[in-house]
Image (tube, helix red, strand yellow):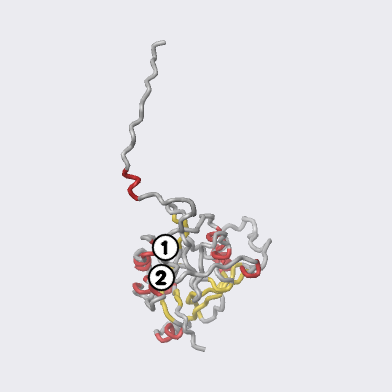
Amino acid sequence: MVDTIKRIFLDPSRCIGCRSCVAACRECDTHKGESMVYIDYVERHNTVATSPSLCMHCEDPLAPCAQVCPAQAILVSPDGVVQSADETRCIYCENCGYACPFGIPKFNMAGHYMQKCNLCYDRTSQGKGPMCATVCPTQAIFYGTYEDWLEAGRGRQGAKPVNTFYFGHQRVRTRNYVVMTQEDEGLDLLALVEEANLGQGMHLPAPTANDNYEEWVPAETAGIPERAAPPQPWTPRTPEPQPGREPVPSHSTNRVAEPISVVRVPTNF
């Protein structure tokens, strides 16, 4: 079956660390000058290798960040794109940051709400590519269908896109892909961390990530209500006026302060 859904293919072997994607991401109107793309430096003391990181838009389990949000501020579009938090609903509890297996959510300290990559939904919903993939000179960030990725010659030399990741016993399948070698069917990140230690910290206690492990419970099983996505979820929405409260006129800040009477207390008793 031909895959008609366009996705992002991240190829760390093609990243040259130019940070063009970071600069382009700042131009997205929904980010307000903040970049939602991260450039990771892999063992900076040994190599200049870099790798781009952005929201993977988890499909199974579906958007853990949205499922743990108590205010339902994070919406998932019908096409599987996990939107950034609605700033009018976000309560800044940071649950999404704890639940994200990739550590992607970024918290706006001034605005007190979460931001992350929403796949440039104002562009991709109109058939355009996301900003980061549009400017990447080496196509380390490739946007398109799997067939587009093959036609561009990216499937040669044993390259294979992987969207299954393991965090201990927890399996996560994502919308976006990471390009690996043909032998890799899944990416065990905890195993890679242990392998990268190369004997460092041998006297540290064993990891306890799997001691109290429980299977992920979907939102519908847990009885968490779902909120339908608006037609344009990337558009900031104004809170509805509360009944019984009149809006403050915009010119109220220009009022002239009334004089305050000053009473002097005599000091000579």
Closer to the camera, 154 or 101? 101
Circle 2 is placed at which residue position? 120
Where does the image place residue 215, in percent across and percent down from the top left? Answer: 66, 68
Circle 1 is placed at which residue position? 236
Quadrant of residue 14 in the image? bottom left
Mark 2 residue crowding within 10 angstroms, few (<14) / some (14–19) / many (20+) = many
| Mark sitting earlier along the chain (1/2) | 2
Element type at mark 2: loop
Foreground tag (1 vs 2): 1
Where does the image place residue 101, in percent across and percent down from the top left? Answer: 55, 65
Q: Are marks 1 and 2 in contact (CB under 8 Å)?
A: no
Where does the image place residue 267, in percent across and percent down from the top left? Answer: 39, 14
Quadrant occupied by the C terminus: top left
Q: Seen in the image, is 185 located left or right of residue 11?
A: right
Element type at mark 1: loop
**Residue drawn at (46%, 51%), measured in percent from left and top?**
245
